Amino acid sequence: MKQQIYNTALYLRLSRDDELQGESSSITTQRSMLRLYAKEHHLNVIDEYIDDGWSGTNFDRPSFQRMIEDIEAGKINCVVTKDLSRLGRNYIMTGQYTELYFPSHNVRYIAIDDGVDSEKGESEIAPFKNIINEWVARDTSRKVKSAFKTKFAEGAYYGAYAPLGYKKHPDIKGKLLVDEETKWIVEKIFSLAYQGYGSAKITKILREEKVPTASWLNFTRYGTFAHIFEGKPESKRYEWTIAHVKAILKSEVYIGNSVHNRQSTVSFKSKKKVRKPESEWFRVENTHEPIIDKEVFYRVQEQIKSRRRQTKEKATPIFAGLVKCADCGWSMRFATNKANKTPYSYYSCSFYGQFGKGYCSMHYIRYDVLYQAVLERLQYWAKAVQQDEEKVLNKIQKVGNAERIREKKKKAVP
């Protein structure tokens, strides 16, 4: 009988969370173990997939998704990891791959240290191992948050980049210094706001006057955001948005305060951010030199509040933050046409609304039409789940993987 050939992916992962747990599973150690195992068991190694510095609760890791792409292409029919925690620390998602995705794609899965080998039958201990791995991730997340809270209470700044107008102190960690080369941009934005200009108008002025964005400045200084600027037209350097301007105008960092803990993740499993009530913020005053006078700052805050609009019912539209323009990627703006005999609501491209035909098109769609289309699709999938839940789950996962791969390729294009 002809022995089956296993075209194998060696998957290696290490994150800072693992280091905090004292695990000595360096990439080098994992590689040596996996290579030796593959040689002893006559596995045909196709490639190594390495995610160094990626959390086990995040399954959007670049090399992990590249491996999934190769599985979809039929290049891989065996995956080997040091243990189950290398694959992931999210109990549900790890089980989704080991118990549904791999079997449905005829992929053999081996976790060496945990004694898991799907070819020899399902390991009874695997689900319990996954639960333990998730508990470790939860405990680590709690410890990291606790450590950061202590630092925040001291007023230290720990962002990846200093806010526009500032630079990090070369010797004192967490200390900000005024950046004389860029503070004029912040002063200009506040000056325009103080004169009565709204965020949309300020955004337009910054673009027209070719004022560089913070991301462009970081690119010129540190080489970051290369995928955004390399090979792109010069206009990309000055592509300010209303969101950028509003964030600067609302930031207390410009009056010398450090404010942290304004948002947090939903849970240790999700990277989705949720805004926290102001009572839970960490605000420490006078931690660094201000750029903007407090009187100017608070006057601008009052002007911002006076411009806020609400519906009569003070309700949030059901699709708020979800509808994007297919061409430019900007959010679709919700509005109501009251000039008509029977008022109706609709969405249109906010990029077009701000900058006109030269940038995008209106992409108009009535709210009731969109609502009905979404409702019909939800009803369709609800019925499909009732008929064959496993088939639907596999299809959703396949579409999700394909979408992540497309996003990864898009970011990789210079």
Image (spheres, helix red, strand yellow):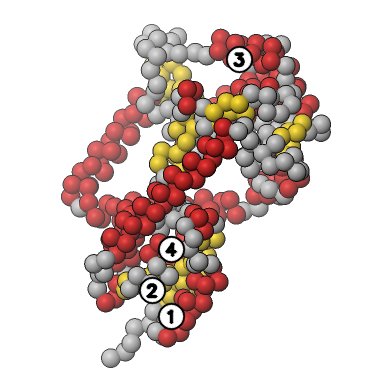
For the residues labelled 3 and 1, the Cα–Cα distance comes to: 63 Å
Residue 233 spot, x, y in % from top left: 72, 42
Mark before the other along the chain sequence, 2 or 3: 2
Residue 305, labelled with which disc? none
- Judging from the image, what secondary structure is the residue with disc 3 in? helix
- Judging from the image, what secondary structure is the residue with disc 4 in? helix
User: Which residue is tagged 3?
Assistant: 301
Mark 1 crowd level (few <14, some 14–19, many ≥20, 10 Å Cα): some
Q: Is residue 272 left or right of residue 200?
A: left
Quarter assignment of residue 252: top right
Mark before the other along the chain sequence, 1 or 4: 1
Residue 345 spot, x, y in % from top left: 41, 19
Residue in the picture at 40% in, 21% down? 316
Closest to the observer, 51 or 197: 51
Q: Nearer the viewer, mark 3 or mark 4?
A: 4
In this rendering, is residue 148 above or below 18?
Answer: above
Three-letter residue code for mark 1: Tyr
